[in-house]
Image: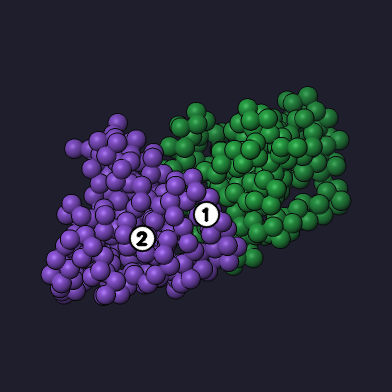
Chain colours: A green, B purple
Amino acid sequence: MREIEFWFEFASNYSYLSVMRIEAAAAERGVTVRWKPLLLGPIFRSLGWNTSPFVLQKAKGEYVWTDMVRQCRKHGLPWQRPAEFPRASLLPARVALVGADQPWIGAYCRRIMLLNFAEDRAIDDLHTVAEVLTQLQLPAQQILDAAQSDASKLKLRQQTEAAQAKGIFGAPTFFVGDEMFWGDDRLDDALLSASA
Amino acid sequence: MREIEFWFEFASNYSYLSVMRIEAAAAERGVTVRWKPLLLGPIFRSLGWNTSPFVLQKAKGEYVWTDMVRQCRKHGLPWQRPAEFPRASLLPARVALVGADQPWIGAYCRRIMLLNFAEDRAIDDLHTVAEVLTQLQLPAQQILDAAQSDASKLKLRQQTEAAQAKGIFGAPTFFVGDEMFWGDDRLDDALLSASA
């Protein structure tokens, strides 16, 4: 089975690029995407950082917003620099974990990412996430109940711990078998490896 | 005039990739390369780091060596992980600054990089640098005297300060006019921009 594990975080701007591109790019190569939402907060804290390195390192942070404008132009994606960065992303991540194996996962993730990075809207918001699910013709309340259950909360913590155990230190990160690829810049290499 | 500023550090593994590729890739696009050797040490110290982030961040550091194997394979470059990283690079950088506008700069930089990243040899060594210059049919002693003059030492310090003032936080970094591109992964985008 040709597949790629896709570890991403809704607050991460480079994850935005990959979330928007991966489903079509993988389909072109006959590769199945395994969606693996995670939280970068605990990973950054384990490195001694209380927020994104793009906030902590001022020069790199300023560069990143220039780079995003160019990358979005290159890939034909809309872009608006979020007024708040990194945005809280707990609820949308829990919902993504509930839907990870469902046919709506790609469309859901793209919609959440567009809210954050193209419409500059908060995403860790019950009403907003419910609206997105409803637009996708899904039973919003049922999915939100599942996402907010203790079992689901535990599962997201475990997923983030599993990411760290695999050596993940940022997002997006791709795995093809045991081989790790870090960053949207390696998406094409990872897909090439998965389809080889 | 179509040109690209190329800021690099001989101790930096991603600078290795760009040093090996840039002259041919720029020539293909009719772009002139302005070679800008710098030292990352003072830049990292200003961020509170006493060495490379690839050493300080263990998970990222381990990943980087896997990534280098793949990137070198992709570009057809030899690769041997240096036993010492990051290597001292002061003398070769001073020599590169002396030769920055000379026709031998590309060949010299590639030879120093190959010593570090393909032959696992120390590069901050008078005998080694003299040997490289001699192999290039250059007046080694005269160039080394110039490189070790007070004026040359001051010039490298000023060049590294100029890099920081431009917002450079890592290497390789490219400038096309005022536009900054960071990382070997952006070399092609930078050249495309320079030739547009």
Residue at 38%, 40% in the rendered image = B188
Amino acid identity at mark 2: Met
Q: Is residue B47 above or below residue A103?
A: below
Residue B77 placement, left or right of B30: right
* B63 and A39: which is toward the camera: B63
Chain ID, mark 2: B
- Where does the N terminus of chain B fall, quadrant-wise? top left
Q: Taking the image as drawn, is residue B8 in sight?
A: yes
Amino acid identity at mark 1: Val
* B91 and A104: which is toward the camera: B91
- Where does the C terminus of chain B fall, quadrant-wise? top left
Q: Position of residue A48 (x, y in %)?
A: 59, 67
Q: Mark 1–mark 2 contact, CB under 8 Å?
A: no
* A86 and A157: which is toward the camera: A157
Callout 2 crowding tier (Cα within 10 Å): few <14, some 14–19, many ≥20: many
Q: Secondary structure at mark 1?
A: helix
Residue at 69%, 52% in the rendered image = A178
Q: Position of residue A32 (x, y in %)?
A: 71, 35
Q: Position of residue B166 (x, y in %)?
A: 30, 54
Q: Is residue A75 above or below residue A84?
A: above
Residue at mark 2:
B113
Q: Taking the image as drawn, is residue A113 in sight?
A: no
Residue at 56%, 41% in the rendered image = A189
The Cα atoms of the two marked residues, 1 and 2, are separated by: 15 Å
Residue at 56%, 33% in the rendered image = A119
Q: Secondary structure at mark 2?
A: helix
Q: Position of residue A2 (x, y in %)?
A: 71, 37
Residue at mark 1:
B69
